Amino acid sequence: MTYDKLFKELKSVVGNDYVVHHEAGLIVFEYDGSVDKALPLAVVLPATPEDVSQVVKIARRHNVPIIPRGAGTGLSGGVIPTQGGLMVALTRMTRVLEIDPENRIAVVEPGVVNIDLSVAASKYGLYFAPDPSSQKACTIGGNVAENSGGPHCLAYGVTTNHVLGMEVVLPDGAISWVGGRTPERPGLDLRGILIGSEGTLAITTKIVVRLLKQPEMVKTLVAAYKNLDEGSAAVSDIIASGIVPAALEMMDDLAIAAAEPAVHAGYPPDAGAILLVEIEGLKESVEEESSLIEEVCRRHNAVEIRTAEDAAQRERLWAGRKGALGALGRLAPNYYLIDGTIPRTKLVEVMARIKEISKETGYPIANVLHAGDGNLHPCVLFDERKPGDVENITKIGGDILKLCVDVGGVLSGEHGIGVEKQEYMPFMFTDDDMAAMARLKLAFETGDVFNPGKIFPTGASCVDISQMGAIAKTGAGAFI
């Protein structure tokens, strides 16, 4: 089949330079931050909502699937074009359209990089609270698609808590608004439905976000422990004491061994685990809470507690945490990152079991986690060039996710389902549950052309998808 007519029509909308359909150019778009890969038929880079609308209409006429894409930093295979199709990359739409300091909101295009929004808002003493570890690269549109979190979501919530409204392009190409510029609006909460829908229902082209006032005081401390159990117990005790820090992160010895030589954050290199705790607010309350947190940390046998003395030292501490994943390349060629969430009271039990899984399988597992809200990120270290490694580590990932669900947790804290976790959905949901959720596609009349083969089980394993694309279930009981 030839797609010359499709490419010609797309070029007439966005220009010759912004339609990529030769294989050498498409390789850049075959993957995200996960382990899966697949080439799209073509990539188009629109510059305006009207461009997106026209692109959707053209793709629908040619019966070609549409895969919205942000910066490609996602970690669940959410933008992998498992069934080929047209990838709509929104990275040309990078304008901060408005900052309204009086109402503490901003209007941005989906390609705005997360940290760039906070930089733009800083001149008004404001910032955007959600801060994924990929903050310097990920885009607001991608954050909306995955309902991303970050270290500071413990106190401030994830993306959905900071988005008031969105302009979206629907499956028929219509441009529409959901939500608005105020926190509460009458009617159905379509904004809440679309956030976290992973590009399966609509394409976001503008976003109204809530901005927060920069705190009067910020204090960051690191507490070192001999082992992971003591650090895990301290996390539960801090929250149980009634203190909710802005952030409460944990890293184990493997993560420290990778991050410290790479970033020189100042973590004790012989620690079995560290807690990175940040408290912010009014000066008096910050001082009081930091003293109480230090008390709790000592009660659980912290061998060392350090407090950042200035902004530069604070930045180094955070650089270690946010750079930990990239630094794992010092230990192994590849890592498989898992994203499950558990009750905080189960941290000691679950982290101990993950260490056992590592010993039983022989694969090192480095742990970085948003410990305060129980969001785990075990990273299984492997080499994709070794026969059997991809199959083995994806099985380990499934075992850890099942463990999370079995103790009362969930499959994802912030990375979404994508293709990585779709076959594990039955751990949490019945067929009836999934059929009810899948009816949203019927309500939005997507025709299953928006990011098909995602979220719901397809009958293909993660390995199958990596090698030959998703195989959708058909007939009675089909979800996609």
Image (spheres, rainbow, N blue to C red):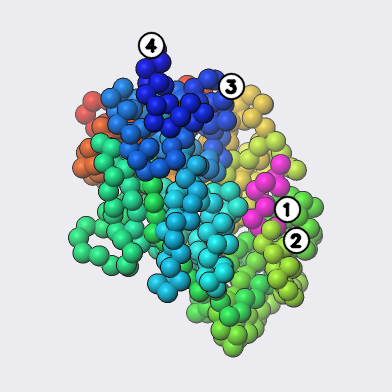
Could you tell which of marks 1 and 3 lies nearer the N-terminus? 3
Could you tell which of marks 3 and 4 lies nearer the N-terminus? 4
**In this picture, is 436 found above or below 16?**
below
Q: Amino acid at mark 3?
A: Ala
Circle 2 is placed at which residue position?
A: 265
Q: Are marks 1 and 2 in contact (CB under 8 Å)?
A: yes
Distance CA(mark 1)–CA(mark 2): 8 Å
Would residue 405 be seen by someone viewing this image from the given angle?
A: no
Name which quarter of the figure residue 246 lies in: bottom right
Q: In the figure, is residue 251 to the left or right of 80?
A: right
The magenta span reads: 320-329
In the rendered image, residue 241, in percent from the top left (x then y), is placed at 52, 79
* Viewer-proximal residue among 383 and 26: 26
Distance CA(mark 4)–CA(mark 1): 49 Å
Quarter holding the N terminus is top left
Distance CA(mark 2)–CA(mark 4): 54 Å
Quarter holding the C terminus is top left
**Residue occupying the point 50% across, 74% down:** 213
**Residue occupying the point 21% across, 64% down:** 186
In the rendered image, residue 218, in percent from the top left (x then y), is placed at 62, 76
Circle 1 is placed at which residue position?
A: 259
Circle 4 is placed at which residue position?
A: 1
